[in-house]
């Protein structure tokens, strides 16, 4: 069953409130969430490879330092945009929290 234009118009606000500060913060939240998600995936993969013996000690050291620096940078940028760690954790409803 498709909705008519009138039905859709009733669902949409008459006026869209676009606050440049909120748009910037929302974009920062989205980007930082994706970066944090990828960082955690890389960290898990690094742990698996380390436990599997496929990384040298030097590679483990460099990977650990890179992941720590990335985590620090995400936290720093989140703070600049007034975001908390919980703000970067999207609720995917039936799948649970993203991070």
Image (cartoon, helix red, strand yellow):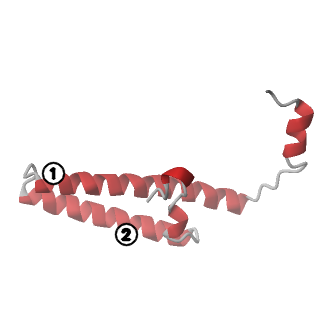
The residue labelled by disc 1 is: 49
Depicted 33 relative to depicted 54: above or below: below
The residue labelled by disc 2 is: 72
Q: Residues within 10 Å of mark 2 (few under 14, many from 20)?
A: few
Describe residue 96's horizontal placement relative to residue 4 as left or right: left
Of residues 33 and 74, the one drawn nearer to the viewer in this rendering: 33
Which quarter of the figure is the C terminus placed in?
Answer: bottom left
Depicted 11 relative to depicted 96: above or below: above
Describe residue 18's horizontal placement relative to residue 29 as left or right: right
Residue plotted at (62% across, 57% down): 26
Residue plotted at (58% across, 72% down): 82
Depicted 85 relative to depicted 53: above or below: below
Describe residue 62's horizontal placement relative to residue 8 as left or right: left
Q: How far from the left and from the top, in percent, is residue 74?
A: 43, 64
Of residues 78 and 2, the one drawn nearer to the viewer in this rendering: 2
Secondary structure of the residue carrying numbered label 2: helix
Instruction: Please state the total of marks drawn on the protein image.
Output: 2
Mark 1 and mark 2 residues within 8 Å of each other at the beta carbon:
no
Q: How far from the left and from the top, in percent, is residue 95?
A: 49, 51
Q: How far from the left and from the top, in percent, is residue 86?
A: 51, 68
Residue plotted at (14% across, 59% down): 60
Describe residue 94's horizontal placement relative to residue 46 as left or right: right
Q: Residues within 10 Å of mark 1 (few under 14, many from 20)?
A: some
**Foreground disc of the pair 1, 2:** 1
**What is the C-alpha distance between the residues marked 1 and 2?**
23 Å
Of residues 20 and 98, the one drawn nearer to the viewer in this rendering: 98
Depicted 93 relative to depicted 74: above or below: above
Q: How far from the left and from the top, in percent, is residue 22?
A: 69, 61
């Amino acid at each position: 069953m498709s909705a008519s234009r009138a039905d859709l118009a009733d669902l949409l606000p008459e006026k869209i409130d676009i606050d440049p500060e909120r748009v910037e913060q929302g974009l920062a939240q989205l980007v930082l969430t994706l970066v944090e998600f990828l960082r955690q995936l890389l960290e898990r993969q690094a742990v698996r490879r380390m436990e599997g013996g496929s990384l040298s000690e030097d590679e483990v050291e460099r990977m650990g330092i890179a992941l720590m620096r990335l985590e620090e940078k995400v936290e720093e940028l989140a703070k600049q945009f007034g975001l908390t760690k919980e703000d970067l954790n999207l609720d995917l409803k039936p799948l649970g929290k993203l991070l």
